[in-house]
Image (cartoon, rainbow, N blue to C red):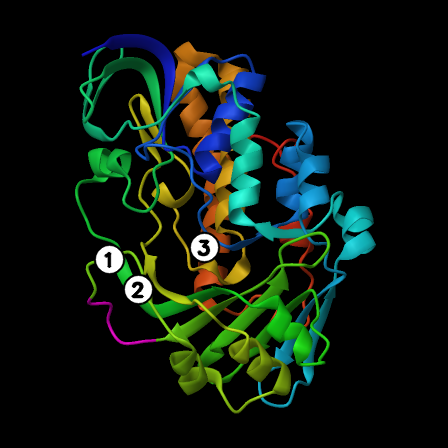
Amino acid sequence: MTEHHIDIAIIGAGLGGAAAMALLHKAGFKAHTFEQAPVFDRLGAGIHIGPNVMKIFRELGLEDTLCNIGAHPDYWFSRDGNTGDYRSKIELGDFAKSEYGAAYVTIHRGDMHATQISALPQDYLHYDHCLTQLEERENDVKLTFANGNIVYAKLVVGADGINSKIREELLGVEKPRFSGWVGHRCLVDMNKLAASGLDFETCTKWWWDRSKHIMAYATKNDESEYYYVTGVPDEPWEHDTTWVESSRDEMNATFGGSHPVVNALIDATTSVTKWPFWNRDPLSLWSQGRLCLLGDACHPMRPHMAQGAGMAIEDAAVLARCLSATGIEDYTSAFGIYENTRRERATTVQTVSNKNTWLKNPEDPAWVYGYNPLTVPLAG
């Protein structure tokens, strides 16, 4: 057993936790991050980096790397799943750079995460640390991990996802609620896709009744990798696993016989998985004592706006600013300002994302993409 005394412990080294660690170090805080996974793994598939998030990566010196890896859609297209008619065409590309202040990029989540992790001070990043117990004391928080290590931290940031151990400490044990929707995820066979002879736009969301959809987009700068994710109403999730295998037959049963491009996507499907979408209502508090939450730990959402990770990274940027403004000793003020600054925006995005109406019809996305977490006025 080893014991360590530190200033800030971040629980979870996902996209939000990695961003929090990087931003806190840049602000002068020696934050340590504790991740339960034994090693880094290139998990997930496609993800969107909106201009609101790319501004943060610019601050961290990662913008060019991510832009060089990911694809750059000129538009977000919304199309009818049967006829192919365009419902809306939201301009991105060079327009996003000039109008919103940064690029819009679609990328493999693993490539984005690896870029973040590689830029962190590795001596402060600790894998194989599953938090089993925490005890808030007068001057610190005692953290006990499954590997026997004990850490005493002045502050603890819960970036540990929808089943957050830190959230449980603040609000008690409560399972998330199944939303009634599932998502299928697939990196398609590019050879089969090319053999179809059809044109595949860099970023298109295909819509059907009840807002059922397929979101399809490139995840590489050279468009050599193409990905789709669905949103489908489904029966209650009765599996004990995080995800289950799906199949091309299931995709055909759900979406087959529609537009030729969609049929070609299904035909190019090799391995496809199915994931439940979980919900929580907006939380009554984001912090208490020396503990605070960010990202899915306090505002999980269905992924239909492609902003779940973005909200976690925005949280991290604002939290770092708040602690810089007050100092670590006045953490009560910092956490209060952080929540006051972030609550309305995160709750609004959570609500819109859960409704699955984002960009289905023409609308102005500036309120999302034009936001700058590095300069937004701090509230309180």
Which type of secondary structure does the marked residue at label 2 adopt? strand
Judging by the rendered image, the residue that carries numbered circle 3 is 350
Quarter holding the N terminus? top left
Position of 10 with respect to 150 (left or right) is right
Residue 88 horizontal side relative to residue 173, left or right: right
Amino acid under label 1?
A: Thr
Q: Are marks 1 and 2 in contact (CB under 8 Å)?
A: yes
Is residue 194 or residue 372 the one in the foreground?
A: 194
Q: Callout 2: 10 Å neighbours few (<14), some, many (20+)?
A: few
Q: CA distance from mark 1 to mark 2?
A: 7 Å
Q: Is residue 380 left or right of residue 200?
A: left
Q: Quadrant of residue 193?
A: bottom right
Residue located 48% across and 19% down the image? 122
Q: Position of residue 229 (x, y in %)?
A: 49, 66
Which of the two residues, 375 or 309, is positioned nearer the viewer here?
Answer: 309
Q: Which residue is mark 2?
A: 244
Q: How many marks?
A: 3
First along the sequence among labels 3 and 1: 1
Q: Residue 192 occupies which quadrant of the picture?
A: bottom right
Q: Is residue 365 visible?
A: yes
Q: Residue at x 68, y 73 (%)?
A: 194
Q: Position of residue 126 (x, y in %)?
A: 37, 22
Q: Amino acid at mark 3?
A: Gln
Tell me the residue that label 1 is attached to.
241
Q: Which residues are magenta?
A: 234-238
